Amino acid sequence: MNDKDLQDLWNSPSPNDPFIIQQEKLIQQMKTRMKKFDKDIKRRNIREYTTAVIVFIAFTFFGVIAFYQNNYLLTLACTIISLGCVFIVYKLFTAQVHISAKAVYTMSNKDYLYYELEKVNEQIKLLKSVFWWYLLPILIGCILFFVASTFTTKALCMHIIFALIITYAIYYANQRTLETDLVPLKKDLEEQLANLE
Amino acid sequence: MSKKQHSIDEQAFARLIEVNKQRIVRICRIYAYSLPDQEDLFQDICFQIWRAMPNFKGHAHLNTWLYRIALNVGMRYQQKNKKQREITHNEGILQWEHSPVPNAATQLEQQEQKERLYAAIRNLKETERAVIMLHLEELSYEEIAEITGLTKTNVGVKINRIKKRLLQLLTPKSTSYER
């Protein structure tokens, strides 16, 4: 078997090759998928930013009220949570790899793999430091909020323990994603790139 | 994004897919194993071609552009499959027909050989698959370099190495390989 034989075998028709593409259906499906794709992105962005905006407005509002009631600890708690929200949005926004999604697949395989690796590295960086930029500011804000609110010591302890458990659960879930999905994916991409060198 | 969608020449898109359907299907066969998966991948590739079409300025050769999309989508599809993501199959747009065969025995033998070739290529490393597929598609070293991002010299070296491995996988008893 030589080079030509291999190429001939590869290019020979298979009995179960698709002979007919239902073109109208194909175009219709592309249009539907495109609409869904646009809608999904819009919906995701709206969901993320709306949540941040709502939390920001609500806690700024509470903070202003607390300030006029001379409850400075509560004001501080609300300010930390509000600024925490702004920081989270900023962090997520700057972490996005700013390449037009449409252009991604037209890159060479090597560039595409580098792009994917860059994306994964960015995600890994985010998840590794998730405690510092995501969990800690909100946790501090929440604890101060509970302390400043009129809770009994027992209720305060319960609230703080609850906040700590939630924080740990979110942290654990993120670290698990890191270990089970992102680190193997990074290794895989690096291997593929090494093969292309 | 939806405004740009209007500028897509639907006829040109349909023609492009029609002309290249066998090439795309061959790539699908390497990156996806079952027929429904292959059809899903086929649709993913078509979708990315559809999305990228308004931006195609003709700087790259159409073939190069198409292969880049198909291979990148194929690689991504396989990465996702590694994570054993549950795939929901889309409604079919292909009609997989069994053609009448004039010489059934020869056809069957050729088909078996082809299946062995697919299996052997699937056994290669992901990036090696792309290189050898493009070589089997009869693309020049220059075109392969443009699609994969390798240098032309590197393409030549890799193809020779992969072909030897491929032939070993394909015919274990074979001892020689003619170029």
Image (cartoon, coloured by chain):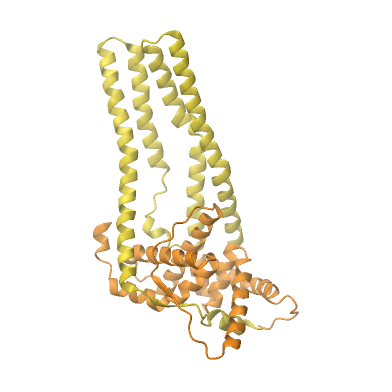
User: Does residue B173 sit above or below A144 in this rendering?
Assistant: below
- Residue placed most toward the observer, A47 or B130: A47
Residue under the point 48% across and 29% down: A132
Tally the marks: 0
Q: Could you say which is closer to the camera, residue A135 or residue B39?
A: B39
Q: Position of residue B63 (x, y in %)?
A: 43, 74
Give the camera-side residue of A50 and A97: A50
Query: x, y percentage for residue A9?
Result: 58, 82
Whole-percent x and y of residue A146?
40, 16
Image quadrant in which you'd find residue A133 = top left
What colour is chain B?
Answer: orange
User: Which chain is drawn using yellow?
Assistant: A
Q: Is residue A77 above or below residue A45?
A: above
Residue B161 appearing in the image: yes
Horizontal and vertical percent position of residue A105: 43, 61
Side of B6 relative to A123 (left or right): left
Asked whether residue B151 appears in the rendered view, the answer is no
Q: Quadrant of residue B33?
A: bottom right
